[in-house]
Image: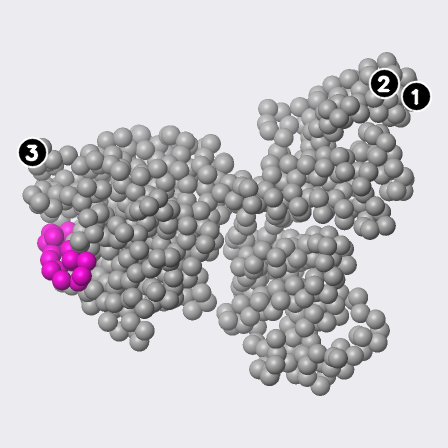
């Protein structure tokens, strides 16, 4: 019985494997059925493009010449291992020269091949550039390139004078959010520099406050590792970098992969999830791996996946939550998966900047209700086992503040820190995890943002331009003491608009603090 | 030299027969490995393992059931799948087609700027959509459109009826078209009752 609509027959028709009679039947059917005619035309178009697109994207690499020798050697070892070595006597050379001559000839041949191969690929692995397709082996290359070193050069800058306007951004879930405090685009004059950046002309900022004393409260010492990222504008860099420091500001080191940002340290401090931007360092996606840049897993797999946060690791669970604009409507939605990217789940919630509670089930995020109203901080629950239905049913608003951003749930579970801009200036805020007890933590005229909790819950690290110089600051909640632990020296640079970064600013990044 | 003769000689352990067979099939196996595992070293391993396993199983090769090339593909595909299962963390499954690469892929017909942009977007979206396919669907798409293996051979390779291959290709293409339609790059299929 013929089908009501063409299905696989479309492919067989295009593949020219149908008989003449079958082809005529398909053509006649398509004439009477607009949907099938459309499918046929659509299939032709896709088919015409698929081959070229795949061949362009994947390349058409040939195996390196040395591989033939390597496979031949492996086969010979196999022959020896299986006791079939005497069969070599049947080679043409053996037949001509006899066993002794053949052995000598083989040795000479192997030596000759070795010389030829060495000659073609002097001092290099067997993978020649021509045999390596574009975008390949990127994580490995990045790992080897700069496992421990700081960037070889940094930039100093002179910036265009002018105030940094501090206006509120549109609601968080708008398809193309623009920011509240666009920093003037600096004019860069880069030079090969010393191991650490030094400021020659800091960004002009409105009424910068003097840098406060950096003395810590007596007997209080923060511990752990802080990860942050920024765009390095040096001509020979021009990439986002992730940096790691000890909580006291010492032990500064550069994460070995380039073109990466939005770091999220796992609770044990051994794993890092991050956003990779371009092929030279890896696939453009969220990735997870160790702090040496190794054992990278693909999370999500879409360009638009962003803002990862690890489950605090209760019961050994290795879970990430993150946001993405991967759908065609470009709206931010929330997803969760295991740390290696497996078992991904679309939570069915629109939102961004998700942060796990210590129980690894509840999470807070920036979102709105289904009608696009009541935008602000929201909370939900994955349930156990994690379920999108549970998450959707559990969603409730915590703070109806449309200018709340970058929430981070405290390790103790009782509070959520976030940044907001109610009065035209970004400051840090704290709210109890049930939505009550909102209080302002900072009131400095400088920008304070991107808060992240210390593992012991006593400190917050945040980004600030206090004193006219951008840096990573710590706030001790009990004493109110503040200290700067890292200076960007020169400002927070934004990448030039366009691929691969698009239009970004400081509030698009995130800080992370772990053991 | 006829492939059957070469295979017979290789079965007997003649290394020059291996050289000739390698010359004929290594590139295809390498590209299969490259398309599945996305790392040059891993693709080289696929070639080596395929020839090693073929050598070990050479007595079991039956030319009446499949061509030697298809048999090698089958061995390579099984090896790739096992590697994907074992080394998921270490595998970079799919690269992204950058905008510049997509631009280079625009046809040489030199259409107007708008058309060129649309084609560019179209191809980018098509590539993104391929990457979003489930593994079974992506596999047949790559085998058929990238490696240009006929559906009949894919059926032998996957040990399934050819109708199943066409059905997977159809489902894959429908999903690709749906993705493109959602992005406004192709018209939606006219609504039809009972359309699968």
Q: Badge 1 is on which residue?
A: A96
Using the rendered image of the protein, determine whether residue A173 is visible from the camera's viewpoint.
yes
Q: Which mark is residue A102?
A: 2
Q: Badge 3 is on which residue?
A: A218
Question: What's the CA distance linking mark 2 and mark 1?
Answer: 8 Å
Using the rendered image of the protein, determine whether residue A490 is visible from the camera's viewpoint.
no
Q: Which residues are magenta?
A: A430-446
| Label 1 crowd (10 A; few <14 / some 14-19 / many >=20) | few
Q: Nearer the viewer, residue A420 or A26?
A: A26
Contact (Cβ within 8 Å) of mark 1 with mark 3: no
Contact (Cβ within 8 Å) of mark 2 with mark 1: yes
Counting from the top left corner in percent of width and height, residue A177 is at 32, 64
Question: How has the structure been colored for display?
Answer: one colour
Q: Nearer the viewer, residue B172 or B94?
A: B172
User: Main SS type for the magenta part?
Assistant: loop
Tell me which residue sits at (40%, 38%) in the image: A290
| Label 3 crowd (10 A; few <14 / some 14-19 / many >=20) | few
Q: Earlier in the sequence, mark 1 or mark 3?
A: 1
Q: Is residue A23 magenta?
A: no
């Amino acid at each position: 019985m013929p089908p009501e609509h063409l299905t696989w027959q479309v492919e067989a028709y295009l593949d020219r494997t149908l008989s003449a009679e079958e082809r005529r039947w398909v053509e006649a059917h398509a004439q009477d059925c607009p949907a099938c005619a459309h499918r046929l035309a659509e299939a032709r178009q896709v088919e015409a493009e698929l081959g070229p697109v795949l061949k362009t994207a994947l390349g058409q690499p040939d195996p390196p010449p040395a591989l033939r020798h390597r496979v031949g050697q492996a086969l010979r070892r196999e022959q020896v291992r299986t006791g079939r070595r005497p069969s070599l006597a049947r080679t043409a050379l053996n037949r001509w020269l006899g066993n002794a001559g053949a052995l000598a000839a083989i040795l000479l041949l192997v030596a000759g091949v070795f010389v030829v191969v060495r000659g073609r690929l002097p001092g290099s692995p067997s993978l020649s550039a021509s045999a390596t397709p574009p975008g390949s082996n990127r994580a490995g290359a990045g790992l080897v390139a700069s496992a421990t070193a700081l960037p070889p050069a940094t930039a100093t800058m002179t910036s265009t004078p002018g105030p940094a306007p501090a206006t509120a951004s549109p609601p968080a879930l708008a398809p193309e959010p623009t920011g509240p405090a666009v920093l003037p685009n600096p004019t860069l004059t880069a030079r090969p520099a010393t191991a650490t950046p030094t400021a020659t002309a800091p960004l002009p900022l409105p009424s910068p406050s003097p840098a406060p004393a950096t003395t810590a409260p007596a007997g209080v010492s923060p511990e752990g590792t802080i990860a942050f990222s920024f765009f390095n504008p040096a001509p020979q860099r021009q990439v986002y970098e992730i940096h790691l420091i000890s909580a006291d500001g010492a032990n500064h080191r550069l994460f070995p992969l380039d073109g990466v940002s939005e770091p999220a340290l796992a609770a044990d401090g051994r794993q890092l999830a991050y956003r990779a931007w371009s092929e030279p360092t890896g696939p453009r996606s969220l990735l997870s791996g160790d702090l040496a840049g190794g054992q990278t897993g693909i999370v999500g797999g879409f360009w638009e996946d962003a803002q990862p946060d690890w489950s605090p690791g209760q019961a050994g669970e290795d879970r990430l939550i993150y946001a993405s604009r991967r759908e065609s409507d470009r709206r931010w939605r929330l997803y969760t998966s295991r740390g290696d990217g497996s078992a991904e789940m679309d939570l069915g919630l629109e939102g961004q900047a998700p942060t796990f509670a210590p129980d690894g089930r509840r999470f807070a995020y920036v979102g709105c209700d289904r009608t696009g109203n009541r935008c602000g901080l929201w909370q939900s629950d994955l349930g156990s086992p994690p379920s999108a239905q549970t998450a959707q049913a559990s969603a409730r608003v915590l703070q109806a503040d449309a200018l709340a951003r970058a929430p981070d749930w405290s390790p103790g579970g009782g509070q959520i820190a976030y940044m907001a801009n109610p009065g035209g200036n970004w400051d840090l805020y704290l709210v109890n995890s049930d939505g009550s007890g909102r209080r302002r933590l900072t009131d400095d005229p400088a920008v304070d943002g991107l808060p992240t909790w210390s593992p012991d819950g006593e400190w917050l690290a945040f980004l600030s331009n206090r004193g006219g110089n951008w840096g990573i600051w710590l706030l001790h909640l009990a004493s109110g003491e503040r200290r700067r632990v890292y200076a960007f020296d020169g400002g927070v640079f934004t990448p030039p608009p366009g691929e691969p970064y698009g239009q970004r600013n400081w509030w698009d990044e995130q800080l992370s603090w772990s053991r | 030299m006829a492939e059957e003769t070469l295979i017979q000689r290789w079965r007997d352990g003649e290394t020059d027969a291996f050289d000739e067979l390698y010359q004929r099939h290594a590139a295809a196996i390498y590209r299969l490995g490259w398309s599945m595992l996305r790392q040059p070293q891993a693709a080289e391993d696929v070639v080596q393992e395929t020839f090693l396993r073929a050598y070990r199983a050479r007595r079991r090769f039956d030319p009446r059931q499949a061509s030697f090339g298809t048999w090698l593909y089958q061995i390579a595909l099984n090896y790739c799948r096992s590697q994907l299962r074992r080394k998921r963390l270490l595998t970079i499954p799919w690269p992204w087609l950058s905008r510049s690469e997509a631009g280079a892929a625009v046809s040489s017909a030199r259409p107007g700027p708008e058309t060129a942009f649309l084609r560019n977007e179209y191809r980018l979206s098509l590539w993104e959509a391929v990457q979003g396919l489930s593994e079974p669907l992506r596999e047949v798409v790559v085998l058929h459109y990238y490696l240009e293996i006929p559906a009949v051979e894919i059926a032998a390779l996957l040990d399934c009826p050819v109708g199943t291959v066409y059905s997977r290709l159809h489902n894959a293409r429908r999903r690709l078209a749906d993705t493109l339609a959602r992005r406004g790059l192709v018209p939606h299929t006219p609504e039809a009752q009972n359309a699968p």
